[in-house]
Image (spheres, rainbow, N blue to C red):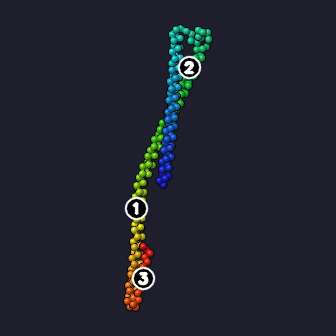
Amino acid sequence: MAEKKEQRLKALDMELDRRSSIIKCKEAKLERLESQLKVRENALQTREKRLSNREGRGEDTSERVSGQPGKESKLNEREKQLQAKEKDLEMKQELLRATERQLTALGQELTDKFHYLKTKQSNRNVPVAMASSIGASQKGRKAAGKVTKVAAKRMNHLKTVGNMLAANKKNANKEKVCIIVTIWDPYC
C-alpha cells in the first residue's frame, strides 16, 4: 500500500515538473512574441515619422520625387498588414496568458494534491509503526512462552530421571547389586 502511494507521489511530482517546464516554454515564447511586437511597433513609428516629415516638407505622399508612382500607397498597404499582424500577435499573447494562468492553476492543484497525499501517508505511517511494535512485542511473548514450555519439559524430564535414580538406589540396597545409570538430557 505504501509503495503504491510512493509511486503515485512520484508520478505527481513528475507531472508537476512537466507542467512547470511547459509553463517555462510558454513564458519564453511569450517573451519572444513581445520582443517581436516591440520591433514591429518601432517600425510603425519610424514609418509614421517619415510620412509626417514628407507631409511637413510638402512632398507628394502618393508619388515620390524619384518618379516611382504608388510607392507610398505600397507603404500604406504594408503598414496595414503590419497593424493586422500586430493585432493577431496581441490576440495570441492574450491566449498564451490565459493558457499560462490555466497551467499555473493546474500546477498549484497538483502541488496541493502532492502535499495532501504526503501528509496522509505520514499520518498513516504512525499507526503502522505502532502496529509493528505491537507485533514485535507479541512475537517476544510467543518466544518467551516457548522458552517456558521447554524449561517445563526439561524439569519434568529431570524429575523422572531423579525418580528412576531413587528407585534404582532402593533396589540396589535390597539386592546388593550396583547399577550404573547414565543420564541423557536431550535439552542440553
**Occupied quadrant, residue 138:** bottom left
Q: Given the current orientation, which residue lies at the most extreme bottom position?
A: 175
Identify the amino acid type marked 1: Ile
Identify the amino acid type marked 3: Val
* Residue 129 placement, left or right of 50: left
Q: Which mark is residue 122?
A: none
Identify the amino acid type marked 2: Glu
Against 155, residue 103 (above or below) is above
Q: Percent position (x, y) of residue 131?
A: 41, 59
Which of the two discs, 2 and 1, labels the residue nearer the N terminus?
2
The secondary element bearing badge 2 is classed as helix
Q: Percent position (x, y) of residue 4?
A: 50, 52
Measuring 49% from the left and 53% from the top, which residue is drawn there? Answer: 3
Q: Percent position (x, y) of residue 6?
A: 48, 50
Between disc 2 and disc 1, the foreground one is 1
- Alpha-carbon span between mark 2 and mark 1: 82 Å
Q: Percent position (x, y) of residue 137?
A: 39, 63
Q: Which mark is residue 134?
A: 1
Disc 2 + disc 1, Cβ < 8 Å: no
Q: Which mark is residue 181?
A: 3
